[in-house]
Image (cartoon, grey):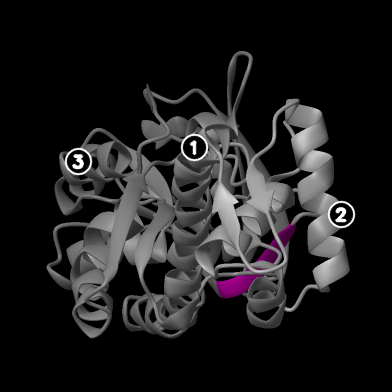
Amino acid sequence: MEDLNDIYFFASVVQHGGFSAAARVIGVEKTRLSRRIAALEKQLGVRLLQRTTRALALTEAGQRFFDRCVATVEGAQAAYNSVAELRKEPAGVVRLSSPVFLAQKCLAYSLPTYMMANPRVSVFLEPTDRTVSVIEERFDIAIRAKPMIEDAGLIAKTLRHSQRVLVASPAFLERYGHPESPAELPKFSAAASSDDTFEGGARWILTSLDSHTQHVEFKPRLVTSDLRVRLQAAIHGIGIALLPEQVVFAPLQERIIERVLPEWSGAKNILHLVYPTPRGMLPSVRALIDYLLIHVPAWLHENSI
């Protein structure tokens, strides 16, 4: 592609009626404008302007070229203006990824408040429990519940620690009894996360209130990465499940499940807010990051055991 500055210079000379006037308006020396237009004519192999000491007129080729130049310059200016508009105030589309449970229980109720306060912002929310690639999939923000992988291109802000607790239905415990220690857990039916499985079984790493650690290996009856499925399995008496405290908070309050071995808990999840480095960040993205940093930890705290 040829130098687009020459197109801008040529259009400016025509629009302002001469080299001197164009030089004053766009802030480019008259001699430079003259040289650039002469070079453009040489490159095209035609004369674009008829010059005299008193007047300047377009040739037929010059008129045709000018018509296209105006559209090009206006299109380029519109492109700059569209970005400048985004930088004035929160506006445009913000792409956000979140774990499914958090999207359903927290963001579904908190995002509308942000959007009402920022009427020119649209939000694309993808609820997913997989770890999205923020850069490659063009997400502006991602909330992650899994351990962070070092990435020089990303910033990670801790939202809150979340412990995992053992739960089961009252009917299940009444029928099969209460385990007295982690060592007894393999005797009970269980629902496990696919992240806790290995070939031939599953493993929970539990920590007591006095910081003792115990590894429990067992054969799960149900394996799934979906928190809601494991919760429903516990509620319906399929077995014991190890779930984040925010997932079990409401069912515990309603007494449709009970804590199992309440002095023991699983490894803590750390929820992170992840986004690309803030250089050149749009106000819409910054505003949503600031909003989430306040409202998500508040919801997590309210739903902690």
Say which residue label 3 marks. Answer: 175
Label 2: which residue?
A: 35
Work out whether mark 2 precedes mark 3 in sequence or the reverse, and give the earlier one. Answer: 2
Task: Classify mark 1: helix, strand or loop.
Answer: loop
Residue 143 lies left or right of residue 188; in this view the side is right
Location of the N terminus by quadrant is top right
Residue 220 in the image, given as x and y percentages of width and height: 44, 26
Name the spot of residue 91 as percent of width and height, x first.
Answer: 36, 71
Q: Which residues are magenta?
A: 154-159
Image coords of residue 120 (percent x, y): 26, 72
Left or right, 3 with respect to 189, comes to right
Q: Residues within 10 Å of mark 1 (few under 14, many from 20)?
A: some
Disc 3 marks which amino acid?
Arg
- Residues under labels 2 and 3: Cα distance? 94 Å
**What residue sits right under mark 1 in the picture?**
130
Residue shown at 27% from the left, 43% from the top? 228
| Above/below status of 194 relative to 300 | above
Badge 2 marks a residue whose secondary structure is helix
Q: Is residue 230 visible?
A: yes
